[in-house]
Image: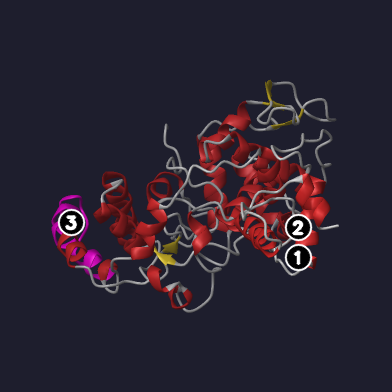
């Protein structure tokens, strides 16, 4: 079945790089909406209301009952923040080194090993049932929602209907809205509990509605495919089912760093010039069916290996375009923070907060506030 889980480019809910990054952690409030930013709460919009009225006729023609429509749209509305976030997406690309620094951070690894220990029985059962490595399932959970901590609290009906009305990708999001309504009509979830990212990705492992329809499973046997529950079983099982049906081969590793112990032979891949070389198998491609990105698939595979007790990458990455190594960048962040210019942490990834700190420091010294790092800047902080 040639269905991608979500082909519109949202990769890592828990990395701050995706649709979920603008939502508060799961579980804050009865349905989570009370703690949402103001622009992610419904506001009056006559054009949206007219669009919904016309959509109801189309939805009924697709088999959605009037009762389902009334329940789904009760309290739903236009979310201006969803449109803003959709239009403000950039093509910013992180290096693989930065990507892995976030995806396999010390915090994520610690939480991942703890989550694996808590849910080991379930994960091993899924491994036997679907043939997908337990650690791979756990790693996807970790990248998509930080092991369930960041599932998203934006009402899915409001989010998908807003984006369908907005029209930039109207046909795609109307299809997601129809699918979401069918999920409600099937009784898997209530409208109040159907929450997710600003773009409609849902649950512990961030399924869009059409992928939920195609792959979600009721592994607990309670009659509902509940990927939103505090119990992640159905979500983890749905992820395993997704990978199994998208070409996962039982007993085959995804790959690994070329030349490292236990790495299978396969296709050679070097995503970042001068960085580590990986040997990847067909199961690497199965992970890419979940998110079509080499960096994502490597992040999943390497996080899975580390959760299982594997070693860090042996090869190093080259200096960045500013001539700084990761250790240099970490030192820069630490020195800036010590001077009162908060970088938000010292992980070697120079994101918006680190760049703002650099700009503020440069301004304080009477320098052009470029936000760009350099060896000279690092030395000036000595």
* Disc 1 packing (10 Å; few <14; some 14–19; many ≥20): some
Residue 199 visible within the image: no
- Residues in magenta, as a range: 52-71
Residue indicated by mark 1? 337
Q: Which residue is mark 2?
A: 333
Q: Earlier in the sequence, mark 3 or mark 2?
A: 3
Q: Residue at x 50, y 62 (%)?
A: 22
How many labels were placed on the picture? 3
In the rendered view, tell whether residue 324 sits above or below residue 142: above
Q: Nearer the viewer, residue 121 or 170?
A: 170
Do we see residue 7 in this rendering?
yes
* Image disc number at residue 55: 3
Verify CB contact (< 8 Å) between mark 1 and mark 2.
yes
Seen in the picture, residue 57 relative to 134 is either above or below; the reply is: below
Q: Residues within 10 Å of mark 2 (few under 14, many from 20)?
A: many
How far is the residue under mark 3 from the one under mark 2?
51 Å
- SS category of the residue bearing label 3: helix
Q: Quadrant of residue 7?
A: top left
Query: Residue at the location (81% across, 35% down)?
Result: 316
Name the side, left or right, on which 243 lies relative to 138.
left
Q: Could you say where residue 154 lies in the image, as x and y percent from the top left?
A: 42, 65
* Residue at the image position 45 percent from the left and 54 percent from the top: 201
266 in relation to 215, above or below: above
């Amino acid at each position: 079945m040639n269905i991608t889980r979500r082909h519109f480019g949202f990769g890592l809910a828990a990395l701050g790089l995706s649709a979920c990054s603008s939502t508060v952690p799961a579980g804050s409030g009865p349905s989570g909406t009370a703690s949402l930013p103001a622009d992610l709460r419904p506001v009056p919009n006559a054009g949206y209301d007219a669009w919904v009225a016309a959509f109801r006729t189309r939805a009924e023609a697709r088999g959605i009952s009037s009762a389902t429509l009334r329940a789904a749209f009760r309290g739903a509305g236009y979310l201006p923040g969803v449109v803003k976030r959709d239009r403000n997406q950039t093509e910013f690309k992180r290096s693989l080194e930065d990507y892995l620094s976030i995806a396999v951070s010390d915090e994520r690894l610690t939480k991942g090993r703890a989550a694996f220990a808590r849910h080991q029985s379930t994960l091993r059962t899924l491994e036997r049932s679907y043939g997908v490595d337990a650690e791979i399932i756990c790693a996807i959970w970790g990248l998509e929602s930080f092991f369930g901590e960041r599932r998203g609290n934006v009402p899915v009906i409001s989010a998908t209907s807003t984006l369908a009305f907005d029209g930039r990708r109207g046909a795609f999001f109307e299809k997601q809205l129809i699918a979401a309504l069918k999920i409600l009509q099937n009784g898997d979830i209530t409208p109040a509990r159907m929450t997710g990212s600003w773009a409609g990705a849902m649950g512990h492992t961030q399924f869009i509605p059409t992928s939920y329809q195609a792959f979600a499973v009721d592994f607990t046997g309670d009659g509902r495919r509940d990927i939103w529950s505090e119990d992640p079983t159905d979500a983890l099982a749905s992820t395993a089912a997704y990978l199994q049906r998208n070409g996962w081969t039982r007993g085959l590793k995804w790959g690994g760093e070329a030349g490292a112990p236990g790495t299978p032979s396969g296709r050679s891949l070097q995503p970042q010039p001068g960085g580590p070389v990986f040997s990847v198998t067909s199961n690497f491609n199965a992970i890419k069916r979940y998110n079509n990105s080499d960096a994502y698939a490597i992040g999943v595979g390497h996080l899975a290996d580390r959760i299982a007790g594997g070693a860090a990458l042996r090869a190093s990455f080259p200096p960045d375009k500013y001539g700084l190594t990761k250790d240099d960048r970490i030192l820069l962040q630490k020195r800036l923070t010590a001077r009162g210019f908060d970088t938000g942490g010292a992980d070697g990834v120079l994101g918006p907060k680190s760049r703002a700190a650099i700009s503020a420091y440069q301004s304080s010294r009477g320098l052009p506030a470029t936000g760009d790092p350099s060896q000279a800047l690092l030395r000036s902080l000595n």
